[in-house]
Image (cartoon, rainbow, N blue to C red):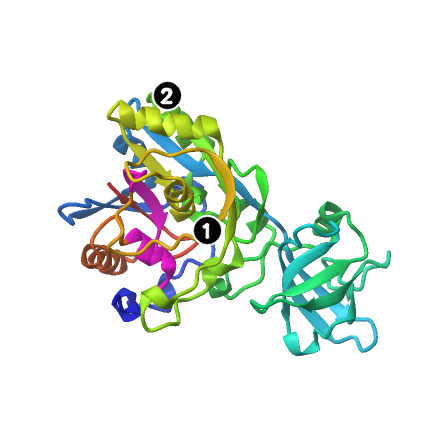
Amino acid sequence: MLETAWFDYDLPEELIARYPAPRRDESRMLVLDRCSGEAQIHPFRDVVDYLNPGDLLVCNNTRVLPGRMFAVKAESGARFELLLLEPCAGVSPAAWNVLLKPGKRAKTGVRAVLLDRKGRPNSVGDFFTVDGKNADGSYRIVFSSADIERLHRCYGHIPLPPYLNRDAEAEDEERYQTVYASAPGAVAAPTAGLHFTREVLSRISARGVGIAELTLHVGAGTFKPVSSEHVEEHKMHFEEFWLPDQVAEQINAVHAAGRKVMAVGTTTVRVLESCAAPDGGVSGRHDRTDIFLYPPYRIRAVDMLLTNFHLPKSTLLMLVSCFCDREKVLAAYELAKREKMRFYSYGDCMLLK
């Protein structure tokens, strides 16, 4: 069996990027040759040079919801923090599955008043009621209003990853979204895409490279560490995705012509591998996936991967190790550490070619 400890590494705290670079495309990019293991560091803008006419860049266009909210119990004033995960299937638009802290206060029937962005109880009477606890530890709540867009706008905060260890600031409302984010529904950003600017995308297009979009709404499970001793024992979370038929046709045509597909981020890979046949052909669909990619699985539908540096013992690091031997990937991480590259969501990136 595959040991989780094989995907561990040490990272100095100072290498965690707690804020984005001044410009999206000012990040650095470690380019790893999947076969030889040779690694070199380039400016991110050089990503254009690794794409040729006829290739295809595939991005995840999900948009992060301002789904972190705060509330106080109507009776006692005790405080709640909640993270909206997804609407309760087949129920009122006001009913949502959420993470609630502290859970010991979240008894069924408890009512809590939403706090505005300045931390004050709202003046229009918006609240939620706890409807019960789910098997996975999340909670069902029902808002007093079904106008979720308004609730997000009035009470929501961008939910930054916990390892950033800070509250969201005004800058994060723009910088924790990709420039092509258009489909609201994610709990976390597809962070490999944060490096792209409109200028870089224009240069890619001018080179004769196609650009296509799919959607996977990144869930809170993306931050869940693998706590089991063996990788195979880990249970993945479900995430909703859409692969349009025309994008699937583009991918198949690119491969039929002998050209390459570059996936922007692990979320894009998860969608394409969920839709891939054994021969690498993909078909469009709207579904939910809990696909867990780890060695010795070999990626079928993607030729190159642009991705950020991932947490130790994470499912994302395991996915990257399906593109290239784990030892080569971890050796590249050591190079990144020596060169003081920036890690995680707001950090630098890595291209596996």
- From the viewer's perspective, is residue 142 above or below residue 307? below
- Residue found at x 24% / y 40%: 353
Q: Residue 20: give its label.
A: 1
Secondary element under disc 1, as helix, strand or loop, is: loop
Please provide the residue range marked out in magenta: 300-320
**What residue lies at 46% left-to-right and 33% top-to-bottom?**
284
Q: Amino acid at mark 2?
A: Ala
Q: Does 28 sit above or below residue 58?
A: below
- Residue 336 screen position, x and y as percent: 26, 56
Amino acid beneath label 1: Pro
| Membership of 152 in magenta stretch | no
Left or right of residue 248, residue 102 in this image: right
Residue 209 lies in what quarter of the image? Answer: top left
Depth order, front residue of 138/91: 91
Q: Is residue 314 magenta?
A: yes
Q: Which residue is mark 2?
A: 206
Q: Please give the name of the residue rendered at 52% of the width and 59% of the height, measured from the top-left corner.
A: 220
Q: How many marks?
A: 2
Looking at the rendered image, the quarter that the N terminus falls into is bottom left
Q: Quadrant of residue 210?
A: top left
Residue 292 visible from this viewpoint: yes
- Frontmost residue, 105 versus 346: 105
Is residue 242 in view?
no
